[in-house]
């Protein structure tokens, strides 16, 4: 049953990574277009950072514990 849990975590990880890349692209496009909506850019960056934290937590969950 653990495999199914890991499978779900991996699927969520892929989804979060895709959303993170999409936000990166959106932020870059706004900056390149010299968009004046700094508040929108700041919100996107904040969301991107939150996604990065979620990705990191999932990666930790998927990393097997190694007993030294």
Image: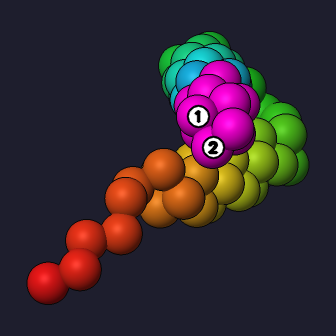
Q: Residue furthest front?
A: 1
In the drawing, what numbered circle is on residue 2? 2
Residue drawn at point x = 85 percent, y = 40 percent? 40
Query: Could you tell me which secondary element the residue under label 1 belongs to?
Result: helix
From this viewpoint, is residue 9 visible?
A: no
User: Crowding near pointer 1: few (<14 within 10 Å), some, many (20+)?
Assistant: few
Q: Nearer the viewer, residue 6 or 36?
A: 6
Residue 49 counted in the magenta span: no
From this viewpoint, is residue 65 visible?
A: yes
Which segment did they paint magenta? 1-12
Indicate the position of residue 48 as horizontal and vertical percent values: 66, 45
Split into 4 quadrants, where in the image is the C terminus? bottom left
Q: Nearer the viewer, residue 16 or 9?
A: 9
User: Crowding near pointer 2: few (<14 within 10 Å), some, many (20+)?
Assistant: few
Indicate the position of residue 46 as horizontal and vertical percent values: 73, 55
- The correct choice, above or below, for 16 with respect to 52 in the image is above
Indicate the position of residue 11 as horizontal and vertical percent values: 65, 24
Split into 4 quadrants, where in the image is the N terminus? top right
In the drawing, what numbered circle is on residue 52? none
In the drawing, what numbered circle is on residue 3? 1
Q: Nearer the viewer, residue 20 or 57?
A: 57
- The correct choice, above or below, for 29 with respect to 52 in the image is above
Residue 3 counted in the magenta span: yes
| Residue contact between numbered discs 2 and 1, judged by CB atoms under 8 Å | yes
Q: In the visual, does 36 lie left or right of 63?
A: right
Residue 37: image quadrant is top right
Indicate the position of residue 42 as horizontal and vertical percent values: 75, 51
Query: Could you tell me which secondary element the residue under label 2 belongs to?
Result: helix
Residue drawn at point x = 58 percent, y = 34 percent? 3
- The correct choice, above or below, for 68 with respect to 62 in the image is below
Residue 18: image quadrant is top right
């Amino acid at each position: 049953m653990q495999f199914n849990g890991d499978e779900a975590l991996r699927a969520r990880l892929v989804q979060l990574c895709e959303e993170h890349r999409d936000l990166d692209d959106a932020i870059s496009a706004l900056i390149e277009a010299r968009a004046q909506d700094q508040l929108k850019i700041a919100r996107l960056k904040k969301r991107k950072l939150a996604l990065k934290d979620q990705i990191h937590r999932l990666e930790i969950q998927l990393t097997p514990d190694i007993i030294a």
